Image: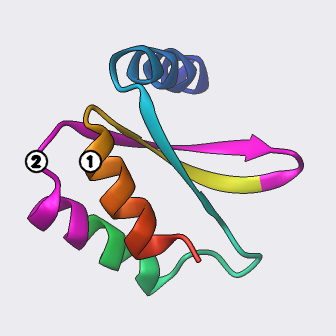
């Protein structure tokens, strides 16, 4: 039941927060980088945001959803190589 609820939440966030940034997850995970991303969001993001894990083309990603294109672009510039 819990997994189904998380799928519904991800779908709801995708409708409400149209701007997305995908962060590829390496085999060893994100580690401290995840803390850096969360700290950045709490400090810099001016809009609502959410994060959900996804599988895109056989690659695990952390997909970040943003209400604002400016916050999405700044986040992407900072964390996507």
Query: In the displayed structure, would residue 19 be above or below residue 46?
Result: above
Which structural element holds mark 2? loop
Task: Name the quarter where the N terminus is drawn.
Answer: top right
Color encoding of the figure? rainbow
Query: In the displayed structure, would residue 20 be above or below residue 7?
Result: below
Viewer-nearest of labels 1 and 2? 1
Which residue is pictured at 44% across the width and 62% down the height? 76
38 horizontally vs 28: left or right: left
Which residue is pictured at 42% across the width and 35% down the height? 19
Of residues 35 and 70, the one nearer the viewer is 70
Mark 1 touching mark 2, by CB under 8 A? yes
Task: Name the quarter where the C terminus is drawn.
Answer: bottom right
68 horizontally vs 54: left or right: left
Quarter assignment of residue 79: bottom left
Name the spot of residue 52 as percent of width and height, x first.
50, 42
Quarter assignment of residue 75: bottom left
In this figure, which residue is indicated by the disc labeled 2?
Answer: 46
Name the spot of residue 32 as percent of width and height, x first.
42, 85
Of residues 80 and 58, the one nearer the viewer is 80
Q: Which residues are magenta?
A: 39-59
6 horizontally vs 74: left or right: right
Query: In the displayed structure, would residue 55 be above or below residue 80?
Result: above
Query: Does 55 lie within the magenta span?
Result: yes
Name the spot of residue 58 as percent of width and height, x first.
89, 50
Query: In the displayed structure, would residue 17 be above or below residue 60?
Result: above
Name the spot of residue 43 as percent of width and height, x first.
10, 66
In this figure, which residue is indicated by the disc labeled 1?
Answer: 70
């Amino acid at each position: 039941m819990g997994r189904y609820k998380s799928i519904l939440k991800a779908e709801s966030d995708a409708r409400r927060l149209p701007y997305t940034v995908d962060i590829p997850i390496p085999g060893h995970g994100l580690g401290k980088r995840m803390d850096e991303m969360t700290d950045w969001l709490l400090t810099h993001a001016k809009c609502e945001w959410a994060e959900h894990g996804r599988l895109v083309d056989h690659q695990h990603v952390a997909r970040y959803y943003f209400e604002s294109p400016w916050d999405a672009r700044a986040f992407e510039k900072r964390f996507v190589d």
